[in-house]
């Protein structure tokens, strides 16, 4: 609030003096639709009026002070990119909502790079959309420092190149974990993921990738997270 003189400046640039009495405020000359400043005459003794602003800029929307119903340019570009990629609008709205709430930090360039990298691995655009709906931060991860190391980890664990897209589609949150040097598992705080290639099929001749989720110090005999514990295999070379 600011203390000004008796004359109040309207949004149209014209000055007017508040009239005395409630009826006088209802006269035609006082009812200007574009006026967005209201004067409080409770301080008439000092000859000052308290200005109470009631404009869109005071609404609690941190992403835009000028127009709370218009997206900033950076977020609008992300929205346009996803719609151009033929993502379904409900999923696009979900992504944009996460960005505005601060749950996802990304840009148009970062979003494009993530989609291009995953499509280059053999995933379809709509499959990337499904992955982004499950993993909140996926579209904000750096492909060079976060996505590629995970893919390299899967290859070192014996996952075939042709099987990587299907594994990522079923476990998109694997990108939220990080590779630890010399460890056979991925880490995220105390959470762990270990990928093992195990025999499958009727004859046991078909290799399959098993993704095990567990926490540091957990016993699989007492509190398993995955159907079976990770295999006791040597760690990756540092």
Image (spheres, rainbow, N blue to C red):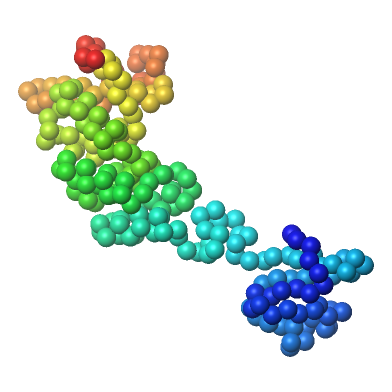
Look at the picture and state if 80 lies above or below 148: below
**In this rendering, would 192 be left or right of 33?**
left
**Among the 4 quarters of the image, the one containing residue 19:** bottom right
Q: Across the whole image, how many numbered discs are drawn on residues? A: 0
Nearer-the-camera pick, 161 or 201: 161
- Which corner quadrant holds the N terminus? bottom right
Q: Is residue 202 visible?
A: no
Q: Is residue 189 visible?
A: yes
Q: Residue at x 79, y 74 (%)?
A: 7
Q: Is residue 74 left or right of residue 69?
A: left
Can you give x and y, in whole percent of width and height, for residue 59 in the image?
Answer: 61, 59
Up-down relation of residue 137 to residue 207 (above or below): below
Percent across and percent down for residue 101 are 49, 48
Q: Residue furthest right?
A: 45
Note whether 141 is above or below 69 in the view shown.
above
Residue occupying image coordinates x 70% and y 71% = 37
Q: Nearer the viewer, residue 4 or 33?
A: 4
- The single residue placed furthest to the bottom in the displayed view is 28
Q: Residue at x 41, y 44 (%)?
A: 105
Seen at 74% across and 71% down, the residue is: 38
Residue 70, given in percent of the width and then of the height, sits at 47, 63
Q: Is residue 229 left or right of residue 104?
A: left
Q: Nearer the viewer, residue 50 or 201?
A: 50
Residue 80, given in percent of the width and then of the height, sits at: 33, 60
Using residue 10 as the reference point, say whether residue 124 is left or right of it.
Answer: left
Q: Which of the pair 128/229 is nearer the observer?
A: 128
User: Considering the image in quadrants, where does the C terminus appear?
Assistant: top left
Res 177 quadrant in image: top left
């Amino acid at each position: 609030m600011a203390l000004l003189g008796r004359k109040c400046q309207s949004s149209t640039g014209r000055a007017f003096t508040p009239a005395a009495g409630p009826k006088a405020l209802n006269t035609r000359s006082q009812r200007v639709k574009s006026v967005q400043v209201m004067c409080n005459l409770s301080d008439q003794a000092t000859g000052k009026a308290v200005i109470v602003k009631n404009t869109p800029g005071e609404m609690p929307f941190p992403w835009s002070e000028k127009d709370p119903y218009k997206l900033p340019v950076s977020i609008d570009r992300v929205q346009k990119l996803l719609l151009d990629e033929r993502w379904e609008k409900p999923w696009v709205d979900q992504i944009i909502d996460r960005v505005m709430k601060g749950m996802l930090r990304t840009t148009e360039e970062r979003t494009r790079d993530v989609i291009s990298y995953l499509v280059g691995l053999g995933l379809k655009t709509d499959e990337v959309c499904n992955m982004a709906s499950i993993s909140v931060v996926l579209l904000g991860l750096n492909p060079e420092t976060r996505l590629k190391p995970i893919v390299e980890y899967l290859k070192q664990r014996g996952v075939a190149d042709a099987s990587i897209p299907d594994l990522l589609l079923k476990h998109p949150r694997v990108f939220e974990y990080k590779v630890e040097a010399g460890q056979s598992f991925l880490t995220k705080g105390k959470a762990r993921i270990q990928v093992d290639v195990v025999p499958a099929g009727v004859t046991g001749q078909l290799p399959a990738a098993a993704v095990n989720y567990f926490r540091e110090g957990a016993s699989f005999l007492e509190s398993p997270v995955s159907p079976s514990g990770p295999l006791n295999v040597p760690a990756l070379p540092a």
